[in-house]
């Protein structure tokens, strides 16, 4: 990602040097930076820029840190912004939505589900603590599966089958909305660029996940009697896994973010992940509830 600017305007005062100074890399353009005065950025500097653009550090007016109890309370209070409160989820878990909407949600969420082990692999790559890696790697196994457990991705494909979608059409990603794709890819890119502790903090939306899984198990059989019962295995599976995972993530966050500035930064990181999940549902609401999918208002191009 970079900005093309004329030589007359390539100065530190008129061009965002964080972007123009990206320097050598797989997407470098020969000669692009020849007339710029700033030196190229290192890969680590670029990662720092990616994280800063995604999650700006807040301006803190006090230096007094919160206690661990207060800090954890504030992290958990972010549940107010969890996507369980999005109108799409409220309708899906309440009065019910159309079969098209349920299938659209399942197909789009699969793009997120298959991205989770990619995210966790990136988190592991940035973790230098062997004990932490031993714990975190279980998340990849939970989703990709092992010889004795098919894993969460396979369980989600069973949900897809239960709602009437074929494995082939879900894995092809043909139903994935652009807004969902952008949001999920942004999350993966953040995990690749962030420190282990920052990425671990972003995963704390798991604090709120058991509630949403339980609601689906409680409500869906009555709301959607047409969904085959074997499709609910993923939700049952994640009830215990999410609770286990979140204990580790909370401890990493409480141990690492100690100053008031870092604690408020951690809240912003968690909010970034909440924004990702909410934005995904915004795209699905437009497509399946408002019946306004991408490009719905565009004229059909002439063949």
Image: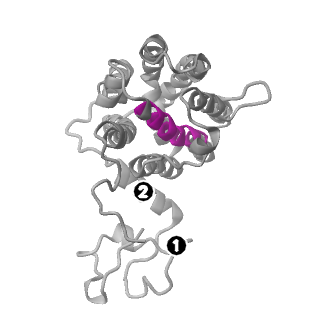
Picture quarter with the C terminus: bottom left
The percent coordinates of residue 91 (x first, y second) are 32, 24
Q: Is residue 179 left or right of residue 126?
A: left
Residue pointed to by mark 1: 27
Q: Residues within 10 Å of mark 1 (few under 14, many from 20)?
A: few
Rendered image: mark on residue 50: 2
Going by the picture, which residue comes out furthest to the front? Answer: 303
**What residue do we see at 28% from left, 80% from top?**
11
In this view, 46 is above or below 126: below
Q: Quick one: label 2, few (<14), some, or many (20+) residues within 10 Å?
A: some
| Front residue of this view, candidates 117 and 87 | 87
Q: Which mark is residue 118?
A: none
Quick check: 182 above or below 233?
below
Classify 292 as above or below 257.
Answer: below
User: What residue span does the magenta drawing correspond to?
Assistant: 101-118
Q: Quadrant of the N terminus?
A: bottom left
Q: Quadrant of residue 58?
A: top left
Q: On the picture, is 133 further left or further right than 99?
A: right
Residue 89 point in image, percent of width and height: 36, 27
Residue found 49% across the figure and 37% down from its top: 109
Left/right of residue 49 with respect to residue 171 in the rendered view: left
Note whether residue 118 is visible: no
């Amino acid at each position: 990602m970079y900005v093309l600017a004329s030589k007359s305007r390539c100065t530190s005062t008129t061009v965002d040097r964080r972007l123009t100074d990206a320097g050598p890399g797989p997407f470098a353009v020969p000669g692009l930076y020849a007339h710029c005065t700033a030196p190229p950025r290192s890969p680590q500097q670029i990662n720092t820029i990616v994280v800063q653009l995604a999650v700006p550090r807040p301006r803190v007016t006090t230096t007094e840190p919160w206690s661990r109890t207060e800090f954890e309370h504030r992290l958990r209070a972010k549940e107010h912004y969890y996507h369980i409160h999005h109108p799409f989820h409220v309708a899906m878990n309440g009065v019910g939505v159309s079969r098209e909407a349920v299938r659209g949600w399942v197909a789009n969420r699969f793009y997120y589900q298959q991205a989770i082990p990619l995210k966790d692999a990136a988190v592991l790559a940035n973790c230098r603590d062997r004990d932490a890696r031993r714990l975190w790697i279980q998340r990849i196994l939970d989703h990709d599966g092992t010889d004795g457990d098919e894993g969460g991705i396979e369980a989600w494909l069973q949900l897809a089958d239960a709602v009437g979608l074929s494995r082939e059409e879900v894995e092809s990603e043909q139903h994935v909305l652009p807004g969902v794709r952008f949001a999920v890819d942004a999350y993966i890119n953040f995990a690749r660029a962030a420190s282990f502790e920052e990425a671990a903090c972003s995963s704390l939306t798991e604090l709120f996940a058991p509630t949403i899984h339980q609601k689906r198990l409680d409500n869906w059989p009555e709301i959607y009697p047409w969904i085959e019962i074997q499709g609910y295995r993923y939700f049952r599976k994640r009830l215990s896994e999410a609770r286990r995972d979140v204990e580790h993530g909370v401890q990493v966050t409480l141990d690492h973010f100690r100053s008031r500035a870092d604690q408020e930064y951690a809240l912003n990181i968690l909010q970034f992940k909440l924004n990702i999940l909410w934005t995904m549902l915004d795209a699905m609401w437009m497509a399946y509830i408002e019946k306004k999918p991408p490009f719905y208002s565009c004229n059909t191009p002439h063949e």
